[in-house]
Amino acid sequence: MHNMFMEIKIISNKNEWNGFLSACAGNIPFAQSWEWGDILIKEGKDIARIAFAENGNVFCLAQMVFVSLPFGWKYAFCPKGPLFVPGIMNYELKIAKLFFDYFKNKNIIFLRIEPRENNLIYNPDNLIRRSMDINPRATLILDLLKSEEELFAKMHPKTRYNIRLAERKNLLVKEEKKFDLFWNLMNETAKRDGFKLHNEKHYREVLNSDIARQLTIFTPDIDKPIATAVFVGFGDTFTYLYGASSYKYRNMMAPHLLQWEGIKIGKELGYKFYDFFGVAPKININRKRQTQMMDSRFRGNDSEGYFCNCFCHSRESGNPSTRLTQNINNKDEQVYNYNSKHQYAGVTRFKLGFGGEYKEDAGTYDLIVELERYRIYRLLRFLRRFI
């Protein structure tokens, strides 16, 4: 207890945690769910589920991953959080001192956060630094309360054509968890598209979780798997998390059918939203140079950070776009400007074809607790690139 009104609670009960989550504003990200925390714990990660309260009323939640650094230092990472209960005034001022006092006593030199709200970022009392995006800050969301006919009509004509083409191939769609199948296709896709995978245990624990579902498409003749995807359902959102496909059978358009089947399953299960989880962020064409410099500065791996490059996607649409502008020609033309060198450029055009609504969070930031040690950490990280 920091004073008679403010306190920090460590939550150890699943129903209590998810109950607090349900009171938070907006779509609740699965990365803050109790179930996702359990996945990380089974991988051996150090997790804490922290509630910030005033007069006994919880106003902020943060599921934290503690990451070890040299010299016995640590930092704490809050994926897709912290989250706030709506209606609390000046929460950014209330939480800052609680964060700093609590984590300073635990040898934490900084907090890596992915807030939805900008108030924490732009509060002049906070010492904060922009960091490389770990989880994608931009995504596309489909409204699953619409009918299948409405959703299909909103797609790009080429996307609709490719789905119908795949359906004419009589491909088989199966919902079953087959880890070896998934792992083989993921390795093939990662090698082809040049992205780094997590260790096998991470994916195995995700698939073992009750919140995960796997869809796989097979050829009709030899029953060969040619595309697979893992989805996570939590709260009111069904999220496309991982995808992989066989290059040999690319002309069958299996990834397009896989997305459409995932969308329909999300509807059948009663979810309100379908999250494509990761597109290249929109940029203001007038600030193109500034944004590209920022992306370049923060591109690369943060090997201490657990979630870095966690959510990998196959490049279903081929090579990254060489154009800055993508036009999606539905009834209303939308212009989508993005950096063609962004790590999600290769999947952005593919996902845009399904007609989702663009959503962007604030991004990834380091809230600095110990400035001098943070500077040493940054220097060591910089020097490591040359070793």
Image: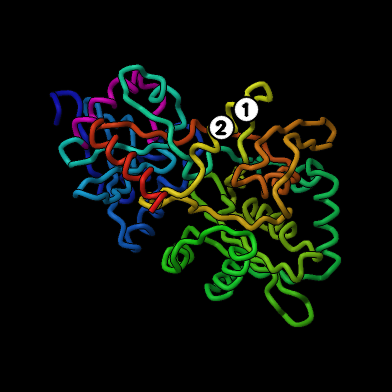
Crowding around mark 1 (Cα neighbors within 10 Å: few <14, some 14 to 19, many 20+) is few
User: Which residue occupies 31% across, 37% down?
Assistant: 111
* In the depicted structure, whether residue 247 falls above or below residue 313: below
Which mark, residue 289? Answer: 1
* Left or right for 33, reference 329: left
Residue 21 in sight here: yes
Residue at the far bottom in the pictured view: 222
Quarter of the image where the C terminus is located: bottom left
Q: How is the image coloured?
A: rainbow
- Quadrant in the picture for residue 8: top left
- Quadrant in the picture for residue 194: bottom right
User: Which residue occupies 75% across, 39% down?
Assistant: 323
Residue 339 is situated, as x and y percent measured from the top left of the image, at 65, 37
The three-letter amino acid code for the residue at tag 2 is: Met
Quarter of the image where the N terminus is located: top left
Residue 252 is situated, as x and y percent measured from the top left of the image, at 80, 66
Inspect the magenta stretch and tell me whether residue 95 lies in it: yes
The three-letter amino acid code for the residue at tag 1 is: Arg
Which mark, residue 293? Answer: 2
